[in-house]
Image (tube, rainbow, N blue to C red):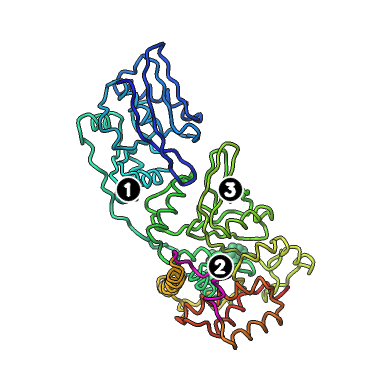
Amino acid sequence: MSLAVLYSRACEGINAPLVDVEVHLANGLPALAIVGLPEKAVQESKDRVRGALVNSRFEFPARRITINLAPADLPKDGGRFDLPIALGVLAASGQISNEALNQYEFIGELALSGELRPVKGVLPVALAARDAGRALVVPQESAAEAALVSGIDIYPVRYLLEICEHLTQGNQIPCYTAPPKSGRTTSSLDLSDVRGQLHAKRALEIAAAGNHSLLMIGPPGTGKSMLASRLPSILPSMTEAEALETAAVLSVSSHGFNAEHWACRPFRQPHHTASGIALVGGGSNPRPGEISLAHNGVMFLDELPEFDRRVLEVLREPLESGHITISRAARQAEFPARFQLIAAMNPCPCGYLGDSSRNCKCSADKVARYRDRISGPLMDRIDMHIEVPRLPTALLHRSTDEFIEESASVRRRVETARNRQLQRIGHKNSAIGRPNSALSSREVETVCALDDAARTLLYRAMEKLKLSARAYHRILKVARTIADLDGHNAIQIAHVSEAIGYRRLDRQE
Ligand SMILES: Nc1ncnc2c1ncn2[C@@H]1O[C@H](COP(=O)(O)OP(=O)(O)OP(=O)(O)O)[C@@H](O)[C@H]1O
Ligand SMILES: [Mg+2]
């Protein structure tokens, strides 16, 4: 037998399409060729495989070796095919048994010594292998990540020799038994660290409950960054599916996934000098950007007007669709990007407009230019804007603030309100539940119906405060979330009036 076929997987966005690794030995001058759109790292695989085989005391066949990675039009990158290529060479030359190979999928990079090195993107591979009903052989260091997927046998391997013995002599390597998933690890950041700012905390709770985007405006040092970084601590727990998706994005990113962060909602805070590519992802071998790393979590844009306007504009599409497609010359990749946008800004360039403690030095013109840096369409996608004013110093020092509440108790209210939303929409349309922020305009009509008194109030407010027509739907959705937090099926006048209060910037138009 001079042909061996093994299964492995490539990396495309957060998917892991199947790759057949075919190894054929033919008579002729000794040579080794890899075909099937391999990138440079895969081409170099030849040398690593040769070194690893020789150092593991195998014979490197002195024949004409052709390795075909199929399908040929799928780009293949990285050292992940080293292991299946090495095993393919051994099987095709009769040095290991060919029999059981098709029950497994293989992935791993080889060191010249025959040791296996971890690879990126193992989690999506494990998901796909499970769906295909095959066991997965991975480098030892990648096993914990692969084992986050339940219902699949994972074989952790340290050396090439180990897996060869396993394949030839039968089950030598025990299946990896994953430690129980830790679930949500409690963050060290707690909402109770923030003194005062009850209005802002209430807004944060509403934003958390309905997955609403929020812009905080206030002078320097009033706690805006503090509040934003504590939002994940009050968000509802992740479902298994959500946790897997978020982990899969991290798994294919350059950061890699740390199994300790399982089911923790991500919090990303890109700097305002970040480029468009850093934010939405890209590169010749497309990698996820900040918006995808924040999938199912929070993206915090601090000092919003300092961001390049063009960079912010690229956020508009994923904010609506919840995913991003990156097209590069040879390849295309899609990453999920359903994130909650939280932003903060000072009211003016010097930061002290409307602050009682200091005088603002900015002219009206300068303030207008500063605010204009954020485009209308982006502002349109932000549900709530609030002021975070300076606290009286006495309140900051008070050690026993009677209104201090811990994140855990706020989160319980948020979870109850979110469950109401998920059941309501899921039940009616028999689709997966969605938070209020994701209601379509047709759903808003039915789910956010107002009684006469509430409608009159809203119309009057729109006229008096010159609220834009855009603001209308946002206010209704936020009012729906407030009613959900209140445990009401019908939106009351008080809910609408509170929601109108969260449109601070509209009032100045
Ligand atoms: N409400 C508060 N409760 C407790 N500490 C606070 C509060 N507000 C501010 N602080 C203290 O001030 C520091 C700065 O707060 P933070 O970074 O959140 O301000 P900011 O509003 O984001 O300011 P900037 O506009 O300059 O970014 C915090 O690290 C904290 O020590
Ligand atoms: Mg800040």
> Pointer 3: what residue?
278
**Amino acid type assigned to the residue bearing label 3 in the image:** Ala
**Amino acid type assigned to the residue bearing label 1 in the image:** Ala
Of mark 3 and mark 2, the one earlier in the sequence is 3
Is residue 7 shown left or right of residue 168? Answer: right
Of mark 1 and mark 3, the one earlier in the sequence is 1
Region rendered in magenta: 431-449
User: In terms of image quarters, where does ligand 2 lie?
Assistant: bottom right
Instruction: Give the residue furthest to the top.
Output: 29
Front: mark 3 or 2 = 2
Evaluate if marks 2 and 1 touch, with contact meaning CB atoms under 8 Å apart.
no
Evaluate if marks 3 and 2 touch, with contact meaning CB atoms under 8 Å apart.
no
> Pointer 1: what residue?
147
* Residue 440: mark in rendering: 2
Distance between mark 2 and mark 1 Cα atoms: 37 Å
- 382, 480: nearer the viewer: 480
